[in-house]
Amino acid sequence: MIKYVIGIVISFIALSFIRAVMGIISKSVKESVEDAVAGDAPKPRPEPAKATQLRKCATCATYKPEASMIRYGAGEKSVFFCSADCEKKAAS
Ligand SMILES: [Zn+2]
């Protein structure tokens, strides 16, 4: 009887593990497909980075969410400023 119960528990754990792995795989496949589709588009592809990603201010080195920062440039060469003050300091 105990063996039977242990078998059920193990198969349940294995099943949820497989499901988690499958979820990760299908998610990454979907993302790479979306990347490929976006790469074919004539317009510059949107940043894959999430709006909540932290960016470093080029002037004062403060980390803030990308969405709340002033941005210059695109992609890897982007420069971020946490505030208009930092932007002015960088320009001067
Ligand atoms: Zn700053």
Image (tube, rainbow, N blue to C red):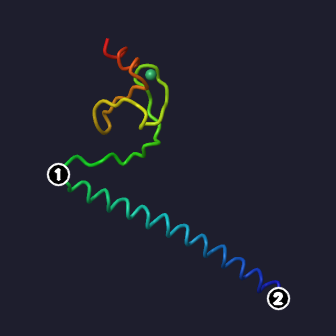
Residue 90 percent coordinates (x, y): 35, 17
- Amino acid on which the number 2 mark rests in the picture: Met
> Which quarter of the figure is the C terminus placed in?
top left
Q: For marks 2 and 1, give the one nearer the viewer.
A: 1
User: In this rendering, would 61 be left or right of 4?
Assistant: left
Observer-nearest of 13 and 59: 59
Q: Secondary structure at mark 2?
A: loop
- Amino acid on which the number 1 mark rests in the picture: Pro
Checking the image for residue 1, the label placed there is 2
Residue 39 percent coordinates (x, y): 24, 54
Q: Are marks 2 and 1 in contact (CB under 8 Å)?
A: no
Q: Residue at x 66, y 77 (%)?
A: 12
Q: Residue at x 30, y 30 (%)?
A: 72
Q: Residue at x 44, y 63 (%)?
A: 27
Ligand 1: does it lie within 8 Å of the C-beta at label 2?
no
- The residue carrying mark 1 is 42
Q: Quadrant holding ligand 1?
A: top left
User: In this rendering, would 13 be left or right of 41?
Assistant: right
Most extreme residue toward the left is: 42
Question: Compared with residue 59, is residue 6 higher up or lower down, i.e. above or below?
Answer: below
Observer-nearest of 51 and 75: 51
Q: Residues within 10 Å of mark 1 (few under 14, many from 20)?
A: few
Disc on the earlier residue, 2 or 1: 2
Observer-nearest of 61 and 89: 89
Residue 10 percent coordinates (x, y): 70, 77
The image quadrant of residue 37 is bottom left
Q: Residue at x 17, y 51 (%)?
A: 42
Most extreme residue toward the right is: 1
Q: For marks 2 and 1, give the CA distance.
A: 64 Å
> Which quarter of the figure is the N terminus placed in?
bottom right
Q: Secondary structure at mark 1?
A: loop
